[in-house]
């Protein structure tokens, strides 16, 4: 057998062996991906990083508005790491609103919803950009959509000082309605009871927060 | 000869838009059409002129529905809904709750100021997307009158109406409310079907509280 042919056959054999080993590894990886299916929302949440933390974070009590019965909202005192920066602080409380309802019955926003971005304009207009799931997975109806929007509005009002009004976007776009009923083309007034003073950003003094404040808010926002 | 204002009934959704859907197969678009037909029939029997934004499984746009109402100078707009959630057997009345405009003077940048100016309508003109703004108080009153009557017929319903940004009310140039019954999630569809007659009676009483009957001629 000529020497060149021997070398060629040897190279081919080595390539086949390497290919065989790679194929087994590739199969194992495909198997692993199949075993852990991830929704688009989960992947996006991982990429964007749900944990918002800044150097000014302090442990503080936030009033997060979740459902209290079928047609009301109520604030729940919730321990969170909150930033002094209003944009980061808004992201922190909204992510808690999505991810940490005390019970499934108190949930107002879909679990798969993600806050994609939050911005504050110089005139006090806040812009909250949510993923498609907020629109596609909120139950259709005036009652359920109002609860969803008002939980966002009231949570921002009571935890982020200085905001005047809110615009809700879905995946960066203005949409007609949340899920067929509540108009998202306009703005939502934010009447913050919290004065924009550094004192509000002070850390907890160590007192244990109450589990829940009294229900004070219905779905209706009286303006 | 008819009495009182023209009543525009708006059964929401229709066509490809089912609205709320229950696991029992109930679809909001079908239930509200039946509600509207029952209510419309009774209103006509009592001498009212009734206009329906749809009478079949079609889906007019929000603007088409509002335009149908705005053809009449003296009208009342009632949009009918069934929710996905809420306590079964309760009914809520809603009026459109507008946001507060930020004054041009408060806008700190020239960009914001110019945007405000470009959105302003010429004097005497009403922007289509805010046609309801001038009727917020009258709609609120009508919604309260309706809610008061609904609460008498449907135990557990609130005593007062609720402000909400209900899309199809936004461009109606007249008193406009949305009435939403709970819910398509009932285990027995008969619960919703049985609401049609008391809902009709309560809405007609609400109309009469808001606008006591006065005979009118023509259209």
Image (tube, helix red, strand yellow):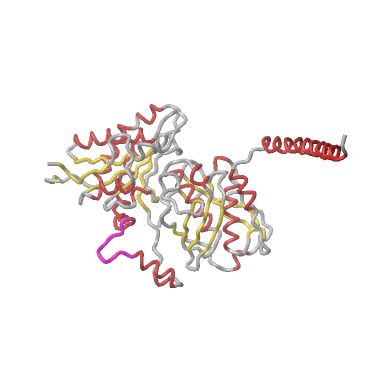
A87 lies above or below B9? below
**Towards the viewer: B120 or A107:** B120
In the image, what residue occupies the spot 61% across and 49% down?
A45
**Towards the viewer: A85 or B140:** A85
Residue B208: % across, % down: 23, 43
* Total number of numbered discs in the rendering: 0
Q: Along the horizontal axis of the image, is A206 left or right of B86?
A: right
Residue A90: % across, % down: 57, 58
| Range covered by the magenta-colored residues | B120-128
In the image, what residue occupies the spot 68% across and 38% down?
A33
Queried whether the magenta region covers residue B187, the answer comes back as: no
* Quadrant location of the N terminus of chain B in the rendered image: top left
Residue A96: % across, % down: 60, 51
Residue B7: % across, % down: 23, 43
B110 lies above or below B153? below
Which is the main secondary structure of the residues drawn in magenta? loop
**Towards the viewer: B203 or A57:** A57
A113 lies above or below B186? below
Q: Along the horizontal axis of the image, is B2 left or right of B99?
A: left
Residue extending farthest front: A2
Q: In the figure, residue B101 lies in which quadrant? A: bottom left
């Amino acid at each position: 057998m000529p020497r060149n042919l021997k070398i060629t056959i040897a190279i081919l054999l080595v390539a086949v062996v390497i290919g065989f080993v790679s194929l087994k590894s590739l199969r194992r990886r495909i198997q692993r991906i199949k075993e852990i299916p991830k929704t688009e929302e989960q992947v996006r949440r991982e990429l964007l990083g749900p944990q918002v933390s800044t150097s000014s974070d302090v442990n503080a009590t936030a009033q997060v508005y979740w459902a209290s019965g079928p047609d009301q909202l109520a604030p729940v005192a919730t321990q969170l790491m909150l930033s002094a920066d209003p944009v980061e602080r808004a992201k922190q409380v909204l992510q808690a609103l999505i991810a940490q309802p005390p019970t499934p019955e108190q949930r107002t926003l879909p679990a798969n919803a993600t806050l994609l971005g939050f911005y504050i304009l110089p005139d006090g207009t806040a812009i909250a950009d949510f993923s498609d799931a907020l629109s596609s997975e909120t139950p259709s109806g005036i009652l359920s959509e109002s609860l969803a929007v008002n939980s966002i509005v009231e949570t921002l009002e009571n935890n982020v000082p200085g905001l005047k009004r809110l615009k809700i976007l879905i995946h960066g776009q203005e949409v007609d309605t949340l899920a067929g009923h509540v108009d998202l083309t306009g703005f939502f007034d934010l009447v913050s009871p919290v004065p924009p003073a550094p004192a509000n950003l002070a850390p907890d003094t160590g007192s244990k927060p109450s589990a829940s404040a009294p229900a004070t808010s219905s779905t209706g926002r009286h303006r | 000869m008819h009495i009182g204002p023209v009543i525009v009934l708006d059964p929401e959704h229709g066509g490809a838009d089912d609205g709320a859907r229950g696991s029992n197969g109930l679809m909001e678009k079908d239930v509200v059409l039946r509600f509207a037909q029952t209510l419309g029939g009774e209103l006509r029997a009592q001498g009212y002129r009734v206009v329906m934004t749809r009478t079949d499984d079609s889906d007019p746009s929000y603007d088409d529905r509002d335009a149908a109402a705005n053809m009449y100078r003296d009208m009342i707009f009632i949009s009918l809904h069934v929710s996905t959630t809420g306590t079964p057997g309760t009914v809520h009345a809603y009026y459109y709750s507008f946001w507060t405009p930020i004054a041009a003077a408060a806008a700190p940048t020239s960009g914001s100021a110019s945007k405000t100016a470009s959105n302003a309508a010429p004097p005497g003109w009403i922007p289509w997307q805010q046609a309801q703004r001038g009727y917020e108080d009258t709609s609120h009153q009508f919604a309260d009158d309706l809610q008061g009557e609904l609460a008498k017929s449907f135990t557990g319903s609130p005593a007062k109406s609720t402000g909400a940004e209900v899309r199809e009310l936004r461009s109606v140039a007249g008193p406009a409310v949305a009435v939403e019954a709970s819910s398509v999630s009932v285990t027995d569809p008969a619960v919703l079907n049985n609401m049609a007659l008391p809902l009709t009676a309560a809405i007609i009483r609400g109309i009469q509280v808001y606008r006591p009957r006065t005979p009118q001629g023509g259209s």
